[in-house]
Image: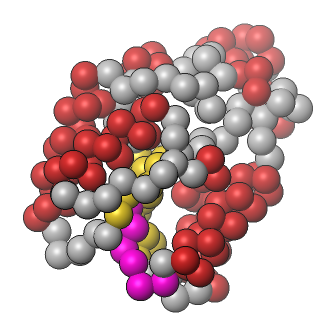
Amino acid sequence: MLIGLVRHGLTDWNALGKIQGQTDIPLNEEGRHQARLLAKRLQQEPYHWDFVISSGLSRAEETATIIASELHIPLASPDDRLRERKYGQVEGLTAEERESQFGPEWHLQDLGQESDLELMSRGLVFVDDMWRKHPESNILVVSMVGSWHSSTNWFVRATTDVSVICR
């Protein structure tokens, strides 16, 4: 099994520096262009991908749809376990706004955000589920590349025969 990790394309909130979390913000035109460029690049790489799956948030789902269409591979039903970290009260805020409202150590406060353990747990359950259901498949996973991928990547590499490619 090979899992390719793909970050969704750009949104207006990304461009403004706002934390999106699980707020459903769509791709902008640049994000759609990025998804098309990535699909073209994936066509040139030596890997064969069996299907694409995303978190179901519209930015990830549209990125996955564009890639699946360009690669002529199936788009699996979305999986909530791939959603970006829930950031609670700081979703929609820029770094300046977060620090102004909650101080520079905002991330250490309980503001309704998902913990590292919660995030890692759902990510690992997803990987285990894919391993059990699709052990011979190569899967493109479209999500937020930061927190989810970094929290699961080290564990997956250390404990299974799953290969993870971060791009």
Say which quarter of the image contains residue 60: top left
Q: Position of residue 112 (x, y in %)?
A: 83, 30
Q: Nearer the viewer, residue 95 or 46?
A: 46
Residue appearing at x 43%, y 33% in the figure: 59
Q: Nearer the viewer, residue 97 or 1?
A: 1
Residue appearing at x 62%, y 47% in the figure: 80
Region rendered in magenta = 135-140
Q: Position of residue 42 (x, y in %)?
A: 20, 60
Q: Is residue 114 left or right of residue 32?
A: right
Q: Is residue 111 left or right of residue 96?
A: right
Q: Position of residue 21 (x, y in %)?
A: 62, 32
Q: Is residue 31 left or right of residue 60?
A: left
Q: Position of residue 3 (x, y in %)?
A: 43, 70
Q: How many marks?
A: 0
Q: Can residue 167 be seen at all in this image of the molecule?
A: no
Residue appearing at x 23%, y 74% in the figure: 47
On the rendered image, what quadrant is the C terminus found in? Answer: bottom left
Residue appearing at x 30%, y 30% in the figure: 31
